[in-house]
Image (cartoon, rainbow, N blue to C red):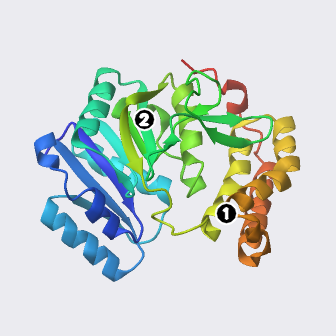
Amino acid sequence: MTAGLAVIVVNYGSHELLIDNLAGIDFVALGARCVIVDNFTSVGELAAVQSLARRHGWDVVASPTNVGFGEGVNLGVAYASDRGTDTFLLLNPDVKISVQAIRTLRDRVQAHPMDLVSPRILNAHGGVWFAGGELDVSSGRVRTSRDVPMDAPFSWLTGACLTVSRSLWTATGGFDPEYFLYWEDVDFSQRAKAAGGRLVVLKDVEVTHDVGATQGVGKSTVYLRFNARNRLLFASKWLPKHVQRRWIRRTPLESYRVLVRDGRRTLFQGKKVAAVVAGSAAGARAIVGPGSQNPNAVAIGAGSQ
């Protein structure tokens, strides 16, 4: 089947969420292809995903290892692109989306192929979880807000629900697999702007993100390690040396802020503290290592629309 739209979902041990959030959508009626990329966790999980796919007409791309979120998306987009798809909706398995929202996001990108488009994303309680992101270059802290101007130099869109054309995807080269998990969407947003794209949040289109459904209660050690590492990895790829050094100096404060999001008791949980320390050390090595002065540092923000 050739489809104008492919919905790309990266699965990692969460087939129950696929049942909850995708099984009720008639992709054939939408003229769309649903591609599940299974980042390997177990034989049983893969079998469950394949069984669901046969039942609902989804396609499965089975990765023999866990290649991370960004590379998982890359695999799904490559699969769909090879089958004639020109528009991709990247969707987390814990996001609930309506058929009408899918149509609206698809139509916007097909009408404006250089737009990178996100809906307004609510949390499970109905509050705003994402309506545009911004990066504070002075501290290296990312924020989401209801009124972030998308033409700001360091604005970004979340990969939880993101629609992109094949032309813009090709121009950016897709997600950078070096991030593995977290911050790859911040990086991708900058490369989309540098390629001449425009970031757009459709405030009248809403989806619901059951935040944390894929990792349980509280921030996992995986989240803490990669969030700490990738903050500095991003700096090594995009920012001048003097700003990179400033981010390193602020790392203890930013690490503290991340840890206490789940309460001050987290400061006494050794594994979580160790994850932040290990991630920060790995990120710092990316900055002080060879080749960390990236030419993107000059161009960042130049592609903002």
Does 184 sit above or below residue 43? above
Which comes before the other along the chain, label 2 or label 1?
Answer: 2
Quadrant of the image for the C terminus? top right
Please tell me whether mark 2 sits on a helix, a strand or a loop. Answer: strand
Residue 57 seen in render? yes
Three-letter amino acid code of the residue under disc 1: Asp
**Residue at x 75% of width, y 53% of height:** 286
Residue labelled with disc 2: 118
User: In the depicted view, which residue is nearer to us: 59 or 125?
Assistant: 125
Residue 85 seen in render? no
- Mark 1 surroundings: few (<14), some (14-19) or many (≥20) residues within 10 A: few
Image x and y of residue 112, in percent: 35, 21
Does 121 sit above or below residue 227? above
- Please identify the quarter of the rendering in which residue 193 is found: top right
- Please identify the quarter of the rendering in which residue 190 is found: top right
Left or right, 125 with reference to 252: left
Residue labelled with disc 1: 262
Disc 2/disc 1 C-alpha distance (Å): 27 Å
- Please identify the quarter of the rendering in which residue 63 is found: bottom left
